[in-house]
Image (cartoon, grey):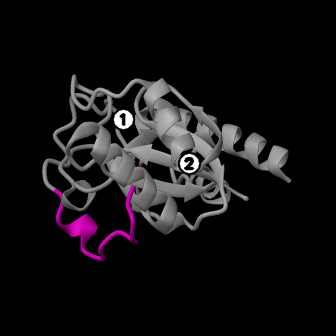
Amino acid sequence: MTTFVALLRAVNVGGTGKLPMAELVAMCEAAGFANVKTYIASGNVVFSSRASEAQVKARLEQALQAYAGKPVGVLVRSAVEIATVLAKNPFPEAPPNKTVAIFLDAPPPRDTLKTLSGQRDEALRLGAREIYVHYPGGQGPSKLKIPAAKIGTARNMNTIAKLAAIAAALQGAAL
C-alpha cells in the first residue's frame, strides 16, 4: 500500500467550496482508501491505497464532483513526494508561514517565471511539480499573479511539514 496526500483546490477557503471533513473522510473510505486522516479544514487528506496516483486522483475527483455538483481539483503526492517537497524548500531560512509550495499536476511550464505580474519582493523557484514562493510581506497583501498556478493549489510550509509527518507515520504503520 502506498500512502498518499491529496490536496483539494478551493475547499473551505474564502467562503467557497464547503466540505465538512467528516464528509471527505467518508468519500475517501467509499473510494476504497484506508487509514484516512484529514488535517485542518482546508482540504488536506492523507490515506493509504493500492491504486496508482492517477487512479486515486480520478476516484477522488469523481466523488467530489458527485458531492459538490461541480469539478473540484485534486493534487496528489505520495508520502515520499510530500517529504521531498518539504526537504527541497529553496527558502529554508524564511518563515514557514510566509513560504508556500503551489502544487501542480505536471512540471511548471518553462516560461513560468517570465509570465508573472505584480511581483514586488516575492521570491520564486521552480520545483519538480511545484512552484515555491516566499512572500516576505505575507500572501494576503501580495499582488503577485502566477498564471501557471491557476490550476494548482498552495500550502504553506507549516502545513506541508504536518502533512509529511502524518504521511510518514501512516506509511510506517502500513509497512
| Residue 127, horizontal then vertical, whole percent | 47, 64
| Residue 35, horizontal then vertical, whole percent | 68, 40
Left or right of 76 in this view: 33:
right
Q: Which residue reaches farthest bottom?
A: 110
Q: Which residue reaches farthest front?
A: 30
Q: Which residues are magenta?
A: 102-116
Does 135 sit above or below residue 131? Answer: above
Q: Please tell me how crowded label 1 is: few (under 14), some (14-19), or many (20+) other residues with Cα within 10 Å.
A: some
Does 146 sit above or below residue 25? Answer: below
Left or right of 35 in this view: 107:
left
Judge depth for marks 2 and 1 and give the one in front.
Answer: 2
Residue 111 belongs to magenta span:
yes
Name the foreground residue: 69 vs 99.
Answer: 69
Please name the residue shown 47% across and 39% down the image: 27
- The residue indicated by pointer 1 is 136
Q: Which of the 4 quarters of the picture holds residue 143?
A: top left
Can residue 100 be seen by looking at this rendering?
A: no
Left or right of 110 in this view: 155:
right
Left or right of 150 in this view: 86:
right
Q: Secondary structure at mark 1?
A: loop
- The amino acid type, in three-letter code, at marker 1 is Pro
Please name the residue shown 39% across and 70% down the image: 106
- The residue indicated by pointer 2 is 5
Does 35 sit above or below residue 42? Answer: below
